[in-house]
Image (cartoon, rainbow, N blue to C red):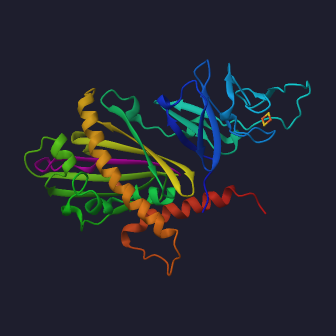
Amino acid sequence: MGFVRNAWYVAGWSSEFGGDLRAITILEQNIVTFRAADGRVVALEDRCPHRLLPLSKGKRLGDTIQCGYHGMTFDGAGRCVRIPGQDRIPANAYVTAYPIEERHDIVWIWMGDPAQADPARLFNMPEFSDPRWHAHQGEALHLKSNYLNVAENLVDPAHVSFVHPTTLGNAASENVPVQVDTEGDPIVAWRWIRDSAPIGFFKNFGNFQGTVDRWHYYYLHLPCTAVIDFGSSDAAARLAEEDRDQGVRIFALHFMTPVNAQYTIDRWMHLRNTAQGDDAVSAQMDAMFNIAFAEDKAILEAIQEEENRPQQRPPVRLLIDKASNVYRKRIDDLVAAERPAA
Ligand code: FES
Ligand SMILES: [Fe+2]
């Protein structure tokens, strides 16, 4: 299985992009980036068309990059603007320029046909611009894992009871069935655990005295964005599904950037309807997330190592796999639809 190219992927948090040349790899493509004088991020193929030296090994001159080998110079659109020693610039003397959009302090890159790069398709959610919600960028998890396995983990409420017992789950949820809606985009998997002890996360942040109702909704937007809506409310309130805003509610966002078939960067952040503007709470939540995501990393990397070894038989599929099965099928279809006809 390959990659969906006609999609916006996260190239990084805005804070990762400065004036210096920076080399990144996304979908196996090497890309050089820098922030131009007008503030816009430039992203170019990181390979000089002459002798293939990565342009990131050259130098930035104004808003152009000069190749470090013979000085061919490219502007932010990838056009060659100078070849030392000759006036004629051949038609094939260019590098690919990638469309970039920056929004909510996130830099997005379009990896497919530039003509189809529609900013209206950028991931968005209304809570980003709602003052009742606090947005906080977390960190980047580097996973030696194929992105499909990472995505699967992010549409999977069932693993939480076993993998994250001190933070996001506890034994009360082990046997609670997972519900799914696989009709649209995003694919959704969720469950409620009613009237049970608060999980570690909400022991710290909810100030709950007795038992709680808690929920976990996993929204997987194709191809590579996951939103996990989780929260808790006093069990006595008997909160209805649609009233989740009345509880302590958190959206954990994961932006998966496939580097190659065996490596994925998961940039995570959260939005919350509590402790707005309180940096200490942000730091405490990051600490909890760091514990949980290190647990996922250990599992995902161990799985990748097993996948790389010879397989004797196909994996067993369970009831809890419905959402991930549909996800894989959809990705497969999208990749096939992009493949040029033979
Ligand atoms: S390799 Fe870039 S100019 Fe020669
Ligand atoms: Fe997890």
Nearest the camera: 193 or 100?
A: 100
- Looking at the rendered structure, the number of numbered marks drawn on it comes to 0
Residue 10 as seen in the image, left or right of residue 128: right
Q: Position of residue 182 (x, y in %)?
A: 45, 60
**Image spot of residue 203 (x, y percent):** 15, 46
Image quadrant containing the N terminus: bottom right
**Residue 244: in magenta span:** no
Q: Is residue 129 above or below residue 269?
A: above
Judging depth in this view, the residue of 77 and 132 nearest the camera is 77
Left or right of 287: which side holds 322? right
Q: Which residues are magenta?
A: 223-242
Residue that extends furthest to the bottom in the rendered view of this protein: 312
Q: Residue 51 or 101: which is nearer the viewer?
A: 51
* Magenta-colored stretch includes residue 241: yes
Q: Is residue 20 above or below residue 9?
A: above
Q: Quadrant of residue 20?
A: top right
In x, y percent, where is residue 232?
Answer: 21, 47
Q: Residue at x 47, y 66 (%)?
A: 305
Residue at image position (27%, 28%) is: 279
Residue in front for this viewpoint, 223 or 51 = 51
Residue occupying the point 63% across, 50% down: 28
Q: Residue furthest front?
A: 69
Q: Looking at the picture, does residue 311 appear above or below residue 13? A: below
Q: Position of residue 322 (x, y in %)?
A: 42, 67
Quarter assignment of residue 122: top right
Residue 321 falls in image quadrant: bottom left
Residue 341 appears in the picture as rendered: yes
Where's the C terminus, which quadrant?
bottom right
Q: Is residue 139 above or below residue 169?
A: above
Residue 273 visible to the viewer: no
Ligand 1's image quarter is: top right
